Amino acid sequence: MAALGRQLLKNIFSSWGGYVVRLVITFFFVPYIAGVFGDARYGVWVIVFQTIAYFSLLDLGLSSALTRYVSRYLSERDFPAINRVLSTSSALYLVIGSAVFGGIYLFVHLFFGYFRIGDPGLVEEGKRALLVLGGFMAFNSYLLPWGNSLAAFQRHDITRLLAVFEELIRVVVMVWLIREGYGLMALALVILFASVAKHLVGGLWLRKLYPQVRLSGGGVTSATARMLLGYSKISFGITIGWLIIFNADTFLLGLLSSSAAAGVYNPGAQLMLYLRNIVNSIGIPLTPAISHVEAGGEMDKVRSVYLRGVKYVSYVSYVFLVGVVIYARPFVRLWLPAEFSEAATVMIILSFGAAIFLPQIIGNSVLFGIGQHRYILRTLVFESLAKIVLSVILIPKYDLVGMALANAVPQLVLYVTLFPYFMSRVLAVEMRKIVGLGLATGMLGAVVSLPAALIVSRLLPPTGWGSFAANVATVVAGSVFVGYFLLEKGDRQKLTALLNRSA
């Protein structure tokens, strides 16, 4: 169990490192590509990616089932069962990948023209890029069980390392292509080849770590397929909900407003999505670890992990909320061209919903780990419906602000009511304890960070990158100091020991 805990910490810190790299890349690449392409062309690029995100629905939730059962069988060292899971999922993904490319081909020729893109040349360029990315999605599906299952073996640190190298190489080549005058299709080809290379290296690494792992046609069984699909049918519904909630914004703006509005909205929304991913970097490696613990019948540990996670993430989320409210506008002025100024308003509105939602990412991981993820689906049904209805009502009236409100309002309501209620039922913890813990520690984070942010921004206005960095560093330093004493005694001791070993 101690080894499992050490690997979990290693996975979490490697995930954080990976997302820091992605944030740095986004910080420099988004304003560059937005400035070179302009809002309309950049908006088409964003819409293409949103369309690709919707075709990932055809995964059918199998990736979650793969993680669940590989993790469970790994705890039992049952490699024949693991091989059956990998071989059967490979056969299923062969069908899925082919269906993905076929669906994207039909979408390009039948539906892409419905987006409000004024330039016919941009329409054709977007279609070609989307076809190439359809190939990217198909190859991703073919190679996923072999090249992307290291996380299921609780080696998320390797998965994240490969992802970082893929991202770095991809961005360097894309910048070079943009400088040489290439368009959207060339950028899409870079994404395709970098992804295939990452999966191949991941597969070879898996074989080196676990030579017992083998893929074979003889390992494909109908019983294993039924088991995987039985788990994944709920994960499939969850994937639909998450796509609507986190990947539909620019898609909806492209349909109900314009590609230019989608382009302006995207940078701020992407940063908020990366914040979710930073918290999710705890949740993703936590899921197989929870499965491992739950298989041993240690539900007290599961409850403890959940409550401590809500406590810690609530504190960080409210600190971030304060930071966005105070610094979003000067940040966007420094970061993006003038025509993207409304991205700051988008960030501020989204941050209120994120402060309530983010702590419950820990709950999502717990529910996936113990096979109770149907409660995630029930919450997402309400959240998705509310977002779609509000989007149709608010976007025509308020444009970008309406889209942001359609995201934030359902989160503010559901993640202090319905979702904590479900968690209280599953884990036998009082709902008022869950909600009260999140609000109390969150308000502590706001009380600590808000005065510091207001004082420092008055004394040293963030008008340049140097003064902006000094502002953020001061607020973060004060919040980290107080947050250290917020940690449970055992967690504080572990963190101190980890820092001492690192030093």
Image: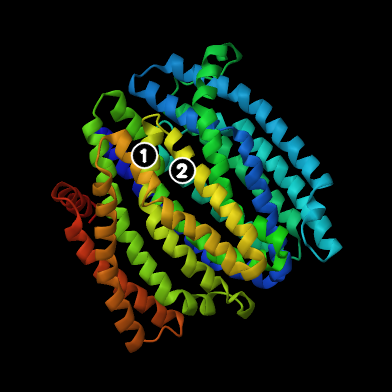
Q: Quadrant of the N terminus?
A: top left
Seen in the image, is 465 located left or right of residue 114? left
> Residue drawn at (74%, 41%), measured in percent from left and top?
104
Up the image or down, 329 lies above or below 157; here it is below
Q: Quadrant of the C terminus?
A: bottom left
> Residue drawn at (79%, 46%), measured in percent from left and top?
108
| Outermost right residue | 120
> Residue drawn at (43%, 32%), measured in percent from left and top?
152
Disc 1 element: helix
Could one spot residue 40 in this view of the protein? Answer: yes
How many residues crowd mark 2 within 10 Å: few (<14), some (14–19), many (20+)? Answer: some
Residue, disc 1: 422
Gap between marks 1 and 2, in whole Å? 9 Å
Seen in the image, is 479 located left or right of residue 406? left
Q: Which mark is residue 246?
A: none
Dividing the picture into quarters, in which one does residue 34 lie? bottom right
Dividing the picture into quarters, in which one does residue 445 lie? bottom left
Disc 1 to disc 2: CB gap under 8 Å: yes
Seen in the image, is 374 located left or right of residue 173? left
Q: Position of residue 164 (x, y in %)?
A: 50, 50
Total tally of numbered discs in the picture: 2
Up the image or down, 43 lies above or below 499; here it is below
Amino acid of disc 1: Phe
Q: Which mark is residue 379?
A: 2
> Residue drawn at (41%, 40%), measured in percent from left and top?
156
